[in-house]
Amino acid sequence: MKKTIIYISCCLALLLTAVSCKDKKKQEKASQQTTPAAARLGSADTASRVIEYTNLVVDMANSHNAYLKDILGNTEKIENALKNPNDKFGFLRIIHPHLTRFTINNRNGVTIENPVSELGKENQAYFKTQVAQYNAKFEKMNTDYKQLKDYLTAQDYKDDKGAKGYALIDTIRGTVQKLYTGKIVLMKKVNEIADAAEIVVLKDSPLKEYIIAMKTDMKNIRSFVDLLSDNANSYTKISARAKAGFAALETAQAKNAGLNIENAKKANKEGDYKNFYESFHNLLLRTKKTLRDAGENGKLTSSDIEGLDSGYDGLIRNYNYFNQ
């Protein structure tokens, strides 16, 4: 049985939103009076609300990355174990992943299940449908994986020579592939909307300098992690590029962490900005150790890459906190 799933490393959009200085009552009034022009992102308040929602879509997609990778990794281990049922250690090497459930919303009460009205009716309907379909596929994958887990626990593969197990593996892989494909389509739509909103939001924002700094750093971190991930088994070949990339990230972290934060203080965002760059600093410390080990071993382990991905996802969360 051939493995047909290829993991797609989704370099998910780094979206931004403005911190509105309007009070809640004023925002609600503006929402009630939304015009076609506003629906096309004609005001900063409208653009901010739109990006608050699209940030949640990105959070959802990112939050499942490591879990889906673990599921795929396990299907390969289980498949190999089914092919060698006499290997008593085969099934013992399988560690079933745990999904931490959480409610995806933001500090302003925006929820992913209910697209904001500022998106306009067409985009509201699009995201409502796409998010529901994604969640349905995700739940199906979990249901099928639980069946596979129960199948292994009961050792039913001894009765059918692994037939049901192979069938479930194929189904799970097919569903994961659909999830990855759906993410790509969803992120394309998110980027289209967010790019338009970004122009409006940044135009007169006092937080523009901080947002651009963080967004640029996130883009460079993602490129750096992808370089390591794509060459994990041949680190020696790209070690010079990796070291240069790491040095550039260190320089950027020091520079941007030292920006004048008076405007951030005025917007009560000083703490969020500092948290972002403290997390960036900690990620660099862990990465330095990872690169040293890779230099000695000539490669990076899957655990190394997962750790980098996890650190990157943490930065996205801190970035979104700043922008709420």
Image (tube, rainbow, N blue to C red):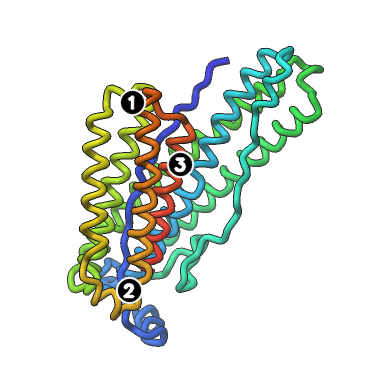
Residue occupied by mark 2:
19
Q: Specify the amino acid type for callout 3.
A: Gly
Query: Of helix, strand and loop, which one carries label 2?
Result: loop
Q: Which residue is located at x 77 percent, y 30 percent? A: 153
Residue 323's spot in the image, x, y percent? 35, 67
Asked whether residue 83 is in view, the answer is: yes
Location of the C terminus by quadrant is bottom left
Residue at numbered disc 3: 307
Q: Position of residue 29 (x, y in %)?
A: 38, 85
Which amino acid type is shown beneath numbered disc 2?
Answer: Val
Mark earlier in primary sequence (1, 2): 2
Could you say whether the residue bearing mark 1 is in a helix, strand or loop? Answer: helix
Residue beneath disc 1: 235
Where residue 213 appears, as percent x and y from the top left, is: 23, 59
Decide which of tag 3 and tag 2 comes sooner along the chain: 2
Mark count: 3
Q: In the image, what residue type sits under mark 1?
A: Tyr
Q: Which label is found at residue 147? A: none
| C-alpha gap between disc 3 and disc 2 | 31 Å
- Judge the density around disc 3: few (<14), some (14-19), many (≥20) Cα neighbours within 10 Å: some
User: Based on the displayed image, in which of its 4 quarters is residue 215 positioned?
Assistant: bottom left
Determine whether, in the image, residue 256 is placed left or right of residue 78: left
Please say if 23 is above or below 216: below
Q: How much space separates mark 1 and mark 3, taking CA atoms? A: 16 Å
